[in-house]
Amino acid sequence: MYQLHSLEEALKHFFGYDTFRPGQQQIVEEALQNRDLLIIMPTGGGKSLCFQLPALLKPGLTVVVSPLIALMQDQVCALQDNGIGATFLNSSLSYEQVRSREAAILDGKIKLLYVAPERLLGERFLPFLETLRSRIGISAFAIDEAHCVSEWGHDFRPEYRQLRQLRQRYPDIPILALTATATKRVQQDILQQLTLRSPGIHIASFNRPNLYYDVQPKQRQSYNQLLKQIRSQNGSGIVYCLSRRKVDEVASRLQQDGIDALPYHAGMNDADRADNQTRFTRDDVQVMVATIAFGMGINKPDVRFVIHYDLPRNLESYYQESGRAGRDGELANCTLLFSAADIRTIDYLIEQKPNPKEQRVARQQLRQVLDYAEGTDCRRTIQLRYFGERFQGNCGNCDNCRSPKPVEDWTIEAQKFLSCVARCQERFGATHIIDVLRGSKKQKIEQYGHHLLSTYGIGQDKSIDAWKMLVRSLLHQGLVDETTDGYRVLKLNKLSWEVLRKQRSVHIAVTQAPAAKAFDINPRSAEAEILFERLRKLRKQIADAQSVPPYVVFADSSLKLMAQQQPQTLEEFAQISGVGTHKLTQYGDKFLSEIRGFCQEQQLPVPLPSDTQMATLQLYQQGLNIEEIAQKRGFTTSTIITHLSELIEMKQPIDLNQLVLPEQQKPILKAIQTIGADSLKNLREHLGESYSYEDIRLVRAWWRRERDC
């Protein structure tokens, strides 16, 4: 084992650095212990050194799997420039060159070999690999750009899936998986697909504080906008376009306007692409106009700007591509030119995917890009949340933070929205929730009975765009979650409940002044507006039965006061303006019943559920029974019963009748009233063996909840 000082000496010797960057030293030490590793470091974080230095300090050869010829050439060139024995084998080489390099490898002159996944597992290469293992030894497999292994990643490559064969063929050789970007779902997919064993997992912060992010509406004369943007920049830059045709067109026009620019895309021949890349990395030209084929792993640290001329396909791609700016830690600009017209182009590309599941996921990823482009929150908050990293916002280095839009208190609107999510049982996406709030007549609303919900139609005072703006901000601030399976189903979390319980306010940056309220009396809470709608429905039913206009029963102003003050007795109800003796007698009981029922429904959980309780609640709300929940969570049914009992006491939406037959409940309640609720054992002995501890526990929880109301 290498001590600290010798590792630093090796670092200085091979790479010229005096100290490790954050996180590198621990990774190198674990690699030297032959551990499997998952390493996620943002572009410019120094992840390549994490496998390169151990490769030089261990006996044998490290095989590096890399997806692109350009990437291999770049890293091998950099290593060779440091006097390190490294080479690559790929389709750009002649037969004689391949044989010459293979001989050098078997002679022990090479410490790092870069190959593509197709070659590594090819029938003709496997015998060479066996010879290599027996004669030289393979110290590790390093899977670079490991996100390519996951269909949930932004650059999925089917051939990467085959890399799981490495573990089967070489069970004793450690595997290091490295990538600059990976969501939690992609991380899990990498671990599973590559069969990593008890791996060390190292995830660095995705925040790149030196990058300035901004989104600009794409103007009608978009090329002139791009040209002006480039002329305002200093140093090298990359312009990303969606299509090869657009790349050629933009590069040509830039050249005509005096900008040193070159194209790069997969439609060019290998020699031209390699030549253009070399000229760009060597600063022979200022600008590379490229499709996403360019840039993965290109080691040009001084790119000062990246402009996305077209909409990226997903947020992960955007983070990766924009992250090619400022790898040296110096200030750099990342600009996205946004036009809704670009959506059609991406949608067409999605349509070309043969798998419906892939299409669904791709469309969700596109929606996330649109949420980013249209978002009013700190750009970093949005990006980092995508990768599961919480950022408080106000970074001071993005357009939304430097030129903030007016911030307004939308707590009531957020409570309405989250309340509707809860009442729809957390089974639908934002579009459906907005339809319910706005009182849509869509067939789907009636099919699920959501036109009968108390939240139906209470959001008509806001436009669809205003509600979407709120949803984006709730997601970006982590105040609500959504599934990542392509369906985008909204799920409440702890922060959601804090908003509903009035423990947390919601402020959002708005692009325009909010619409006027449905009525001019400012209610104290979202509940007041929800109750107002319910009272209006009751008033309409009474009016219809009497064949009179609703205002004859009660004026709106009276209903508003009822909704705000929420009287609980006839005496309190009589104090409402507009309630006389006759109306008190005629309508008092009906309206009080509606108000009391609403108040009981609105009692929210105290205390908040724990994470494990919330996980059980979400599965219950998806319609799973106790056994299915237990199996899904890997717990016993007894543990799930305990969770459900605790949730019932917390006034969470658990239907006791679904869990315990009503005819079983009555004797249990009677037993509790007779001997008390302190001892489950005493209750069971009193009731007899035909009553289970589980049923008694659940009914007792319901009794305690009702007792405490």
Image: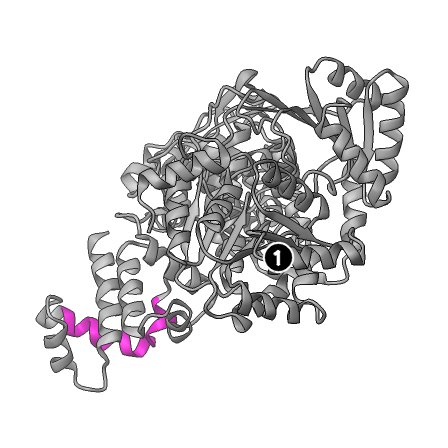
The quadrant in which residue 107 appears is bottom right
User: What SS does tag 1 mark?
Assistant: helix
The quadrant in which residue 127 appears is bottom right
Which residue: 72% across, 23% down? 283
Which residue: 61% across, 61% down? 106
Q: Is residue 167 above or below residue 649?
A: below
Whole-percent x, y for residue 468 in the image: 60, 37
Q: Image check: 12 left or right of 380?
A: left
Q: Image check: 1 left or right of 388?
A: left
Whether residue 473 is visible to the viewer of this picture, yes or no, is no
The magenta stretch spans residue 236: no
Whole-percent x, y for residue 512 in the image: 61, 22
Whole-percent x, y for residue 340 in the image: 75, 34
Q: What residue range appears in magenta?
A: 656-672
> Depth check: 257 or 572 in front?
257
Q: Is residue 607 above or below residue 248?
A: below
Q: Is residue 707 above or below residue 575?
A: below
Q: Image check: 159 left or right of 189?
A: right
Whether residue 629 is visible to the viewer of this picture, yes or no, is yes
> Depth check: 642 or 554 in front?
642
Q: Image check: 673 left or right of 152?
A: left
Extreme top residue here?
232
Whole-percent x, y for residue 7 in the image: 37, 41
Q: Main structural element of the magenta stretch: helix, strand or loop? A: helix
Which residue: 26% across, 63% down? 702
